[in-house]
Amino acid sequence: METMLQALVILGGLTFSLAASLLIEELIFGRIVRVAFSRRPGLPNHVSEHAQKN
């Protein structure tokens, strides 16, 4: 039981540390995390077809 409690405390500390570091990063640099994880738009169909013909 003590080992389980210790693992829970460690996991909670790691989660809190990650959340705090992401918050600080957002406040200092702003939007870097959102840019890194945003989806890139796909190529339009006419561009894809033109690239395949060459």
Image (cartoon, helix red, strand yellow):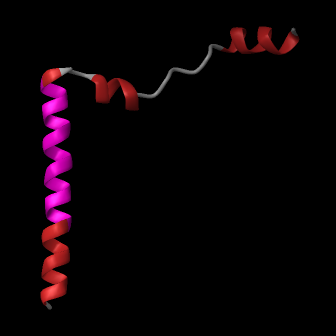
Image height check: is 46 above or below 25?
Answer: above
Furthest-bottom residue in view? Answer: 1
Position of residue 50 measured from the top left corner of the image (x, y, whole percent): 79, 8
Position of residue 4 measured from the top left corner of the image (x, y, whole percent): 18, 83
Q: Magenta stretch: residue 24 in it?
A: yes
Instruction: Tell me which segment is drawn in magenta.
Output: 11-27
**Which residue is located at x 35 percent, y 23 percent?**
35
Furthest-right residue in view? Answer: 53
Left or right, residue 7 beside residue 41 = left
Left or right, residue 32 beside residue 36 = left
Quarter of the image for residue 20 reads: top left
Image height check: is 50 above or below 3?
Answer: above
13, 36: nearer the viewer: 13
Image height check: is 54 above or below 22?
Answer: above
Quarter of the image for residue 29 reads: top left
Quarter of the image for residue 42 reads: top right
| Magenta highlight: main SS | helix
Image height check: is 54 above or below 20?
Answer: above
Q: Magenta stretch: residue 51 in it?
A: no
3, 35: nearer the viewer: 3
Position of residue 17 measured from the top left corner of the image (x, y, whole percent): 16, 50
State the quadrant of the C terminus. Answer: top right
State the quadrant of the N terminus. Answer: bottom left
**Which residue is located at x 21 percent, y 48 percent?**
18
